[in-house]
Amino acid sequence: MLTKDELPECPVATTVQLIGNKWKLLIIRNLIYDGTQRFTDFLKAIPAISKKVLTDNLRALEADGLVMREVFAEVPPRVEYSLSPLGMSLKPVLDAMMAWGEEYKGNSDG
């Protein structure tokens, strides 16, 4: 996790740094629109992602305070991921991206 002093000065660059790769966006998308997920849920919903890349991105999102990880004391252990309130505040951003993508796909010139 970067300190606030280490983040880019530009707010757009900060946002891109925190959620700017396709895997993080898809993880956040799943949590916003489908709710709490387990590791295998992500693997089913994002088939192109490897276990290592998923693990690395979940850890980064957790370290940045966007995702919460809850471990249940069961055998075998159950782990669930959900968005923190800060992560949930990204919903309008993803809603706008979804709307823009739908409009772009519907535009015959695009």
Image (spheres, rainbow, N blue to C red):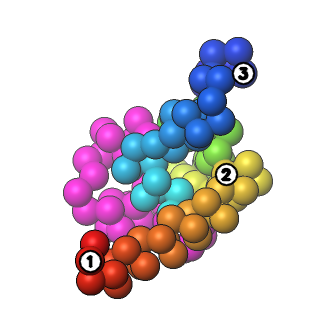
Query: Is residue 109 positioned above or below 76 on the image?
Result: below
- The residue under label 2 is 87
Query: Where is residue 61, by image quadrant?
Result: top right
Q: In the shown orientation, is residue 105 left or right of residue 95?
A: left
Callout 2, which amino acid?
Answer: Gly
CA–CA distance between discs 1 and 2?
34 Å
Query: Is residue 45 positioned above or below 81 on the image?
Result: below
Residue 37 falls within the magenta-colored stretch: yes
Q: Quadrant of the N terminus?
A: top right
Residue 102, position in %: x, y?
A: 42, 78
Asked if labels 3 and 1 touch by Cβ distance under 8 angstroms, the answer is no
- Residue 92 showing in the rendered view: yes
Who is closer to the viewer here, 22 or 38? 22
- The residue under label 1 is 109
Residue 48 falls within the magenta-colored stretch: yes
Q: Which residues are magenta?
A: 30-57
Callout 1, which amino acid?
Answer: Asp
In the rendering, which numbered label is found on residue 4? 3
Report the residue at 32% width, 62% height from top: 46
Asked if labels 3 and 2 touch by Cβ distance under 8 angstroms, the answer is no
Query: Is residue 66 positioned above or below 30 on the image?
Result: above
**N-terminal label among 1 and 3:** 3
Report the residue at 43% width, 79% height from top: 103
Exactly how many numbered labels are in the figure?
3
Q: In the shown orientation, is residue 83 left or right of residue 51?
A: right
CA–CA distance between discs 2 and 3?
17 Å
Label 3 neighbour load within 10 Å: few <14, some 14-19, many 20+: few
